[in-house]
Image: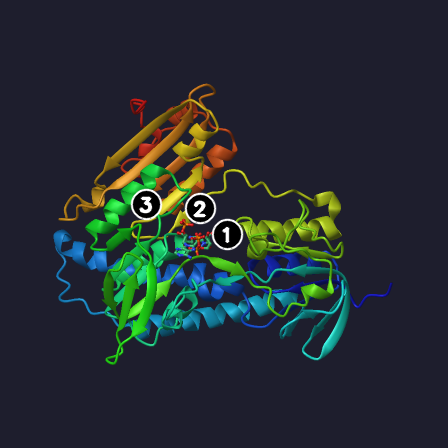
């Protein structure tokens, strides 16, 4: 069969761009189609602009604490438009860099919505191209529950472009996005109510982390309500919103943001013209090599609903490019011990097993915990505290999980992720000298295991 291309990538997000660049670098004939913005969710309405908003929000604490260090800062004022526009400018710059990276690698970038006509043919921007392999990397889009008045609510995509900062906001959801945006809004001075349908947010994270974060966020003035869900939203004549809860309660607010998960972006892709299968959760079903039920079509990243994190999509993109065009360099993605951070204020950083997961696996664990006021805050009136936790396998002495809440937790945990990957034992942690005085040194100086609650 004659093909115009070796690889056609649909979606120029983290995973798609990495696969396209790498494949083109290996000499493959590659085109990548993108209908919205280069860089995908991460660069445009995710990780990168989110972190900028988190930095913006964190100045609130810095101003409050500066006086204890002798600074007179006056009454700080905040201008949302300045932050939003500066952020937009930087994102536009990054979009340009992504376009350059792709073209410099030799990949063709096509602006437009790609649609599969069959297992090898893609139609985009009025052109039909036949590719030996097609990679679907279209990602996900925010999902809003189907309730009356849902059209009055915003998603995280909208939150990045708000025309003005609301005075009051309800954030509904208890995952990464809900927790991060609740902190962002609070830091920027908004009155925040966060509603989560479960007993406690961040399901799947270590219980100690979840409880400690709940307490810290309440200290910062967030109104956290658990076992609580919105039944309907009405817009009132004065422009404000009235949220009616499932239990019959009401909350007046200016903005409702749903952060209730994300669904795979498959609309108009033409998958019905191929043998690609969708799993019961609505994501593209793939095997261990990211191959769909249609042999020429592969899928990676959020659209396969495995682990929705940028570094995972990058790793999957590299695995696909290598397997197709440099099989001798192929390395499978290791889904164990993926470190991650939640950029709440304070941050969570975590790698490895939670205490609950370790116990569910039938392991006997020793747990080391430490809570303390970080040195930087000792001169201030802040009652914020840092939390560190190690979960250790009692039989092998292997450290199974490292968890932290505190400033720059992600930066600390990234280093510890290397130690866990290398199979470090608690003895190795104990033999490692600390860097004094830091928060991170506490990870190598915790000596007494918590008495077993059983
Ligand atoms: P998550 O899947 O993490 O969380 C969804 C939340 O919404 C859960 O708390 C869930 O509750 C709740 N929920 C789901 N459906 C409903 C409903 N119908 N009504 C009320 N609540 C509901 O999704 P996010 O959108 O927060 O994030 C998506 C993914 O993006 C994350 O899983 C993460 O992988 C990635 N991400 C990573 C970030 C980072 O690395 N810092 C930042 C942001 C996102 P329940 O727990 O009960 O199911």
Could you classify mark 2 by the number of other residues whose Cα lies within 10 Å: few (under 14), some (14-19), or many (20 or more)?
some
Q: What is the C-alpha distance between the residues marked 1 and 3?
A: 25 Å
* Residue that protrudes farthest toward the right in the picture: 1
Residue 261 position within the rendered picture, expressed as x and y whole percent measured from the top left: 45, 57
Ranked by sequence position, the earlier of labels 2 and 3 is 3
In the picture of the structure, the residue carrying the numbered disc 2 is 340
Question: Where 230 sits versus 343, above or below?
Answer: below
The circle on residue 309 is 1
Query: Is 129 left, or right, of 425 in this rendering?
Result: right
Q: Nearer the viewer, residue 223 or 354?
A: 223
Is the residue indicated by label 1 positioned so its CB lies within 8 Å of ligand 1?
yes
Task: Decide if ligand 1 comes within 8 Å of the CB at mark 2.
Answer: yes
Figure check: 430 above or below 228: above
The residue to which callout 3 is attached is 199
- On the image, the x and y values in percent for residue 40 come to 53, 64
Q: Nearer the viewer, residue 229 or 305?
A: 229
């Amino acid at each position: 069969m004659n093909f115009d291309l070796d690889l056609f990538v649909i979606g120029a997000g983290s995973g798609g761009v990495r696969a396209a660049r790498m494949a083109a670098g290996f000499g493959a004939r590659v085109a990548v189609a993108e209908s919205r913005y280069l860089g995908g969710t991460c660069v445009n309405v995710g990780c990168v602009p989110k972190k900028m908003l988190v930095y913006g929000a964190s100045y609130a604490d810095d101003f409050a604490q500066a006086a204890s260090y002798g600074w007179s800062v006056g009454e700080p004022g905040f201008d949302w438009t300045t932050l939003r526009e500066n952020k937009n400018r930087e994102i536009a710059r990054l979009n340009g860099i992504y376009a350059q990276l792709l073209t410099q690698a030799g990949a063709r970038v096509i602006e437009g919505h790609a649609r599969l006509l069959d297992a090898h043919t893609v139609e985009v921007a009025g052109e039909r191209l036949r590719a030996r392999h097609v990679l679907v990397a279209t990602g996900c889009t925010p999902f809003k529950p189907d309730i009356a008045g849902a059209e009055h609510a915003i998603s995280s995509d909208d939150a990045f472009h708000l025309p003005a900062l609301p005075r009051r906001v309800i954030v509904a959801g208890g995952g990464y996005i809900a927790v991060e945006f609740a902190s962002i809004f609070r830091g920027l001075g908004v009155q925040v109510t966060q509603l989560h349908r479960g007993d406690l947010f961040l399901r799947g994270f270590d219980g100690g982390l979840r409880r400690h974060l709940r307490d810290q966020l309440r200290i910062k003035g967030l109104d956290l309500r658990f076992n609580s869900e919105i039944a309907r939203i009405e817009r009132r004549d004065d422009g404000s919103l009235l949220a009616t809860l499932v239990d019959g309660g009401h909350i007046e607010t200016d903005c409702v943001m749903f952060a209730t998960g994300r669904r795979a972006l498959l609309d108009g892709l033409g998958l019905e013209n191929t043998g690609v299968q969708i799993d019961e959760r609505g994501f593209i079903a793939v095997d261990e090599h990211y191959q769909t039920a249609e042999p020429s079509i592969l899928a990676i990243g959020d659209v396969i609903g495995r682990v929705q994190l940028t570094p995972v999509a990058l790793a999957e993109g590299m695995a696909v490019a290598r397997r197709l065009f440099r099989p001798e360099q192929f390395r499978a993605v290791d889904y164990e011990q993926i470190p991650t951070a939640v950029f709440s204020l304070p941050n969570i950083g975590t790698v490895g097993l939670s205490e609950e997961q370790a116990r569910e696996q039938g392991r006997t664990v020793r747990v080391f915990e430490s809570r303390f006021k970080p040195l930087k805050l000792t001169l201030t009136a802040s009652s914020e505290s840092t939390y560190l936790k190690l979960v250790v396998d009692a039989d092998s002495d292997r450290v199974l999980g490292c968890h932290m809440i505190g400033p720059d937790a992600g930066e600390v945990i990234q280093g510890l992720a290397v130690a866990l990957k290398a199979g470090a034992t608690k003895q190795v942690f104990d033999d490692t000298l600390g860097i004094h005085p830091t928060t991170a040194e506490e990870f190598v100086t915790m000596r007494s295991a918590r008495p077993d609650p059983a």
